Amino acid sequence: MRAIRKNSFFLAAIAVATAVLWAGLNRPIPEAPWPERVKGFAFSPLRAGADPARTPYPGRDEIAADLALIEANAASLRTYSLLGSLGEIPELAAALDLNVTAGVWLDRDPARGAAELAALREILPERDNIDRVLVGNETILRGDLSVAALSVLLDELRAEFDVPIGTAEPWHIWFANPELAEHVDFIAVHLLPYWEGIHIDDAVEFVAARMRELQARFPDLPILIAEVGWPSRGRSRGAAEPSGVNAAAFLRRFMQRASTEGYDYFLMEAFDQPGNAPTKAKSAPTGARSTSRGGPNSRSRARLSPYRTGRGWR
């Protein structure tokens, strides 16, 4: 009996020690609270399984339903194209008092580019809620246009319209082509530390460091973080691990830092996009990504992110 009691005590002691060790190793780490509203979302209205290279795009009612969700949590959004039903986004957003940074998609198809520019010239004069225009999205990164050709187009549009005109590129493209900054009204930069293999614990400081460098290099231009975020799924990339937990942690930490530093930003992206998977990187600093997007909004839509249900934050 004494041996049984001794063994029971020994097992209980092990159980207690194990529980204490587990609790110590798995103690919840406090994160910054969600803000009531964020600055803005990058917005794609495509549904899961949709092919961005084919029409039709989502209809007006579907887009309006998406915008109603965004309106509950943000004051602005960024788009990538003005063709088809995507051109109705600024009008629908105006009804919800949402500002729009309108995107003009440019690639190697001159007919597509001409159609985008024609849509811009038709829509922009009618929509007071378009407060900025992004002419091209990673166009230089993909090699679809030269810096010289894009610069000419930017200058033409800046002379034609009163709203600020810019183009969006990853940070290293701006440093490699600083002359591009002479043809824009603001720097629009993509800062996506996951794509560069940065560990989640270093990710926000990575963003902040790139912002300090950009501010030092281009002191006379406002800087817009046109895409920033972390994926909830996908494959590991260097020290970066995609997961819902890491995505939520990054967003909380980033938005706290953005509030402190006064960053203007669009979270990537308004809806969780399972189709936005990593692609093989081009040669670039710290493995900066290349994109294989076949066109604007080439991501399949799943649910509003970052991790919200209904009309409120989780």
Image (cartoon, helix red, strand yellow):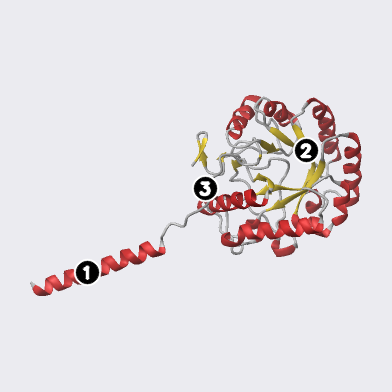
Alpha-carbon span between mark 2 and mark 1: 67 Å
User: Can you tell which of label 2 and label 1 is closer to the viewer?
Assistant: 2
Q: What SS does tag 3 mark?
A: loop
Q: Which residue is mark 3?
A: 33
Q: Which residue is mark 2?
A: 132
Q: Give me the C-alpha separation between circle 2 and circle 3.
A: 30 Å
Three-letter amino acid code of the residue under disc 2: Arg
| Residue drawn 83% across the image and 33% down it | 115
Q: Residue at x 68, y 48 (%)?
A: 262
N-terminal-most mark, 2 or 1: 1
Q: Position of residue 234 (x, y in %)?
A: 57, 53
Which kind of residue does numbered mark 3 sit on?
Answer: Pro
Question: Which quarter of the rendering shows the N terminus?
Answer: bottom left
Find residue 11 and name its label: 1
Question: Who comes first in sequence, dot 2 or dot 3?
Answer: 3
Question: How far from the left and from the top, in percent, is residue 269?
Answer: 63, 43
Residue 46 picture location, percent across and down: 64, 36
